[in-house]
Image (tube, coloured by chain):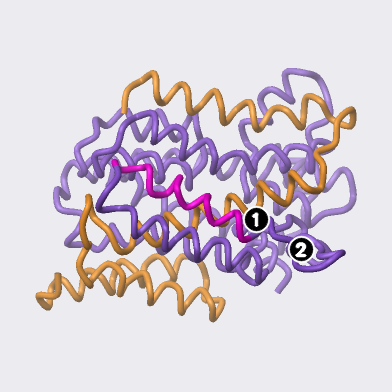
Amino acid sequence: MTLTAVLLLAAGTYAFRLAGPLLGGRITVSERLRHLLAVSAAVLLVALVATGALTQGHGFAGWARPAGVLVAGVLALRRAPFPLVVVAAAATTAVLRLCGVA
Amino acid sequence: MRSLIRTLERATLRDIALVCLADALVGVSFGAISVSGGLPLWVPVAMSVLVFAGGAQFAAVGVVLSGGGALAAVVTALVLNARLLPFGFTVADALDGPRWRRLLGAQLLTDESTAFTLLESDPRRRRAAYWVSGLALFAIWNVAVVIGAAAGGLIGDTDALGLDAAFPAVLLALVLPALRDRRTRTAALAGAVVAVAATPYVPAGVPVLLALAGLLFAARPTGPAAPPPGAASEPVPGSGRSDRLAGEVRR
């Protein structure tokens, strides 16, 4: 991760943020584009969850990590508080590894 | 600042504090994972101040740590952050004022600050909710990342603590509410299958972008007047995090 990459990402992100407050009421984002951006974000997030939980490099990450993420998913579905979801995922994975599950 | 805080109800302030606590945990994991993964300390710290978007930061660092190129990292993170564009239009009124204030306030735009703003209808409270949640999160996020980054150098093996599970767990919790919409869910699952299947064969970072092929499933119209996900009941259509936060705050 070079400084250029960080700055590029920062500048692009800031541009997304600033457009609304600067242009205010003069432009409105169409409902279609709004919907497409929302679905794109969901698609990317789920893909990040799947690859982040299951893969490491070009291979399988082992069972401990996806198990932790699964526990988090169940807790989140049951509307557990956010801090608990995070801690439970890490704890599950850590305990499984302690027991020798990769 | 004090008058802004007094404008808000106690319950709102408590909810903001709870979200800050959750984000602090995520920030610590982010800093620790970045540094123990081999990145220099300044990278997570600079990213947190300049980019200030948890999901995108994790995504970018994840791509780099798994051996991907910087370009793939930036593109992935920018596509994720594109959702901030409509958010900005949604809360623009809360940032009304002199130009310097808009330039400064824009950096505080996140899923969370958008969600808290949308929960208020009175203009004064909308403004207060935006600035209080935005400033609090900015401060706490950056402090947490510095602490995590410093600890990451000492911990060495973050895997033993299961910290590598924290990031996908957080994202899953964030995105779950958006998946109540059937077409979004279909698109996301199709995309995830593509991403995982492609992982052994393409450079790191690319699989997640390939997942956007799943959008083909979302674009197919299923009915003449299908509303966007949660258009009626949710303040921010389809944004996982905001939906979730809004749900929490309403309870």
**Quick check: B214 above or below B97?**
below
The chain that hosts pointer 2 is B
Q: Amino acid at mark 2?
A: Glu
**Quick check: B21 above or below B88?**
below
Q: Which residue is mark 1?
A: B239
Q: Position of residue B44 (x, y in %)?
A: 35, 35
Looking at the image, residue B80 sits to the left or right of residue B195; the answer is right
Look at 85% across and 36% down and name the residue there. Answer: A28
> Which colour represents chain B?
purple
- Bounds of the magenta span? B203-217
Q: Position of residue B157 (x, y in %)?
A: 15, 53
Would residue B12 be seen by someone viewing this image from the given angle?
Answer: yes
Separation of residues labelled 1 and 2 (CA atoms): 9 Å
Q: Amino acid at mark 1?
A: Ser
Look at 17% across and 50% down and name the residue there. Answer: B155
Which labelled disc corresponds to residue B114?
none
Count residues near mark 2 (Cα–Cα under 10 Å), then give few for <14, some for 14-19, many for 20+.
Answer: some
